[in-house]
Amino acid sequence: MKRLVLALLATAFIGAPAMAQNATQVSSAQNGASCPRCNLFQADFNNRTLKNKNFAGARLRQSDMGLGIFNGTNFSGADLRDINASAALFGRVNFAGANLTNANFVGAYLEHADFRGAILTGVNFSGAEMGSATGLTQRQMDQTCGDRSTELPRGLRIPVCVVH
């Protein structure tokens, strides 16, 4: 009986569709369209300007957003795990309820960004400007790291990143 259950489970996983990006949605978003709940897995938004867009609930996991300008964009509830957002501009962005696990925000501008309920485990905020960010708790910050130049809202502290 166990073998039958294991065989059925293996068949289900093999037959399951891959969670690859949707090329049409990626192209549309890269060209400036809002794309809520889209599958933008591993999309290249490096050095793009996408201000005031709606990516609420979108899957942006492992996307490259480095050097991009995303001011005013809604990423609430989005999957932003493992993104590269180094030196990007995220002023007045909504990250409420987003999963930002292992995101790289080194040198990013995050002033007035809303992090209410966001998952920040493993996020690197070294050199980030986030002194006016909202919705942050010490519990969230304890799961992240930064450096001496990280600008935080008053009353919060950040562990120093360990270089391996």
Image: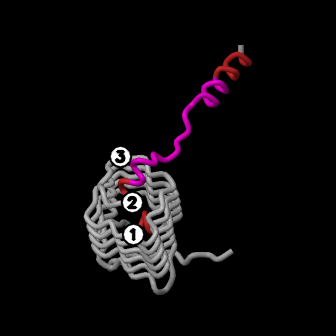
Of tags 1 and 3, the one toward the viewer is 1
Label 3 vs 2, first from the N-terminus:
2
Q: Which mark is residue 1?
A: none
Separation of disc 1 and disc 3 at Cα? 20 Å
Mark 2 touching mark 1, by CB under 8 A? yes
Circle nearer the N terminus (1, 3)? 3
Q: Amino acid at mark 2?
A: Gln
As helix, strand or loop, the secondary structure at mark 2 comes to: helix
Disc 3 on helix, strand or loop?
loop
Residue 37's disc is 3
Magenta-tinted stretch: 9-27
At label 3, counting other C-alpha atoms closer than 10 Å, the crowd grade (few under 14, some 14-19, many 20 or more) is: some
* Residue at 38%, 75% in the rendered image: 156
* Mark-to-mark CA distance, 3 and 2: 15 Å
> SS of the residue at dot 1?
loop
Task: Point out the image quarter for the N terminus.
Answer: top right
- Which percent across, then down, holds residue 67? 44, 75
Q: Which mark is residue 30?
A: 2
What residue lies at 46% left-to-right and 48% top-to-bottom? 23
Q: Amino acid at mark 1?
A: Arg
Q: Label 3 is placed on what type of residue?
A: Arg
* Percent position of residue 73, x then y: 29, 63
Query: Callout 1 environment at 10 Å: few (<14), some (14 to 19), or many (20+)?
Result: some
Residue 48 is marked as 1
